[in-house]
Amino acid sequence: MIMLCVIWGFQQVAIKGVALNVAPVMQLATRFAGASIFFGALVLIREGGRAFTDGTLPSGLLLGLMFSLEFIFAGQALVHTTAAHAVVFLYTAPIFTALGLQFLPEEHLSPLQWVGISVAFGGIVVAFFGFNGRPAVELVTGDALALFGGVSWGLCNVVLRRGRVSGANTAKVAFYQVATATLMLGAFAAATAQTAIEPTSMTILSLAFQTLIIAISSYLVWFWLLRHYLTSRLMLLSLLTPLFGVMFGAALLKDPVDLRFALGGLLVLLGVLIVNSRLMRGKG
């Protein structure tokens, strides 16, 4: 999970780094198109024409809708706000996942773990709040879009856990998401005139990384983890991703990092430690 956090932290830099050559939403549509071909082929090889007659289609399409909204909001957020602000609000997703999963006894969080959520989220706010330089209205607009992306991501995990699609194999679950996202993000990019691509070497490298490493490899690992570990705890560990994102941003995009970030990072780690304390004591 920590390895995934490193990879996902870098993706914000990969998107932002070539945003002048390809709009973020078009980058996302392109990478999901490549992933759709890969996962679609796997599904056809394994199940053939009966692949979508097992009753998972309705919840699979709902899953794809939530997944698509997450990335539409996230892509537009990067147009209006900084990468740091976008990743902060996008990673409020664990809170919405935990709230949505409270009806499952095995996912129920204790009062101490809720304290951990609060501490971790507070740490993210401390670490990133104030890093801007853009007009306030534009920044708030971008932050709100990223927050909606976090809500969509959180609900996406609830559907994956509670819907019939949870019984589908990993390739089919991934296909529902990336295929729906390809259509929705592609349509959104076309409707908003964001389809232009300047094929520089950095653009091609970034899109290749996003497609092969993020949209294919990391999703395979993520869905495997969701089947073997509690969703709420995985989502809470994902709070480490913004920290890695800012580290990469500081090294590659020269984003500022100061004492506030160090303090926020310690609070995030403390929150994650509190949430997982029962597991370390052998009680969870």
Image: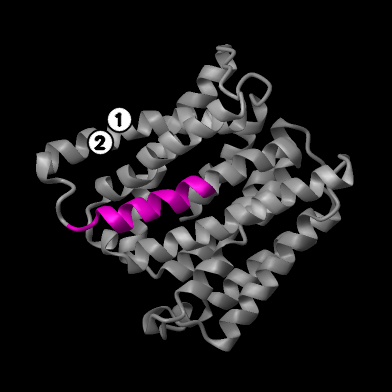
Closer to the camera in the image, 165 or 92: 165
What residue range appears in magenta? 55-69
- Relative image position of residue 228 (x, y in whole percent): 31, 65
Residue 222 visible, this orientation: no
Report the residue at 43% width, 40% height from top. 181
Instruction: Work out whether residue 201 or residue 153 is closer to the camera in this orientation and state it.
Output: 153
Q: Is residue 152 left or right of residue 140?
A: left
Name which residue type carries label 2: Gly
- Count of marks overlaid on the render: 2
Q: Determine the main secondary structure of the stretch shown in magenta.
A: helix
**Residue 180 at x, y = what percent?**
38, 41
Specify few, some or many for label 1: CA neighbours under 10 Å numbering under 14, 14-19, or 20 or more.
few
Q: Are marks 1 and 2 in contact (CB under 8 Å)?
A: yes
Q: In front: 162, or 264?
A: 162
Magenta stretch contains residue 122: no
Say above or below: 25 vs 104: above
Q: Amino acid at mark 1?
A: Ile
**Residue 232 placement, left or right of 36:** right
Q: Element at badge 1?
A: helix
For mark 1, what is the residue? 37
Q: Is residue 254 above or below residue 262?
A: above
Query: What residue lies at 43% left-to-right and 61% top-to-bottom?
Result: 157
Query: Can you see residue 75?
Result: yes
Q: Residue at x 66, y 27 (%)?
A: 17
Residue shown at 29% from the left, 32% from the top: 38
Q: Is residue 63 magenta?
A: yes
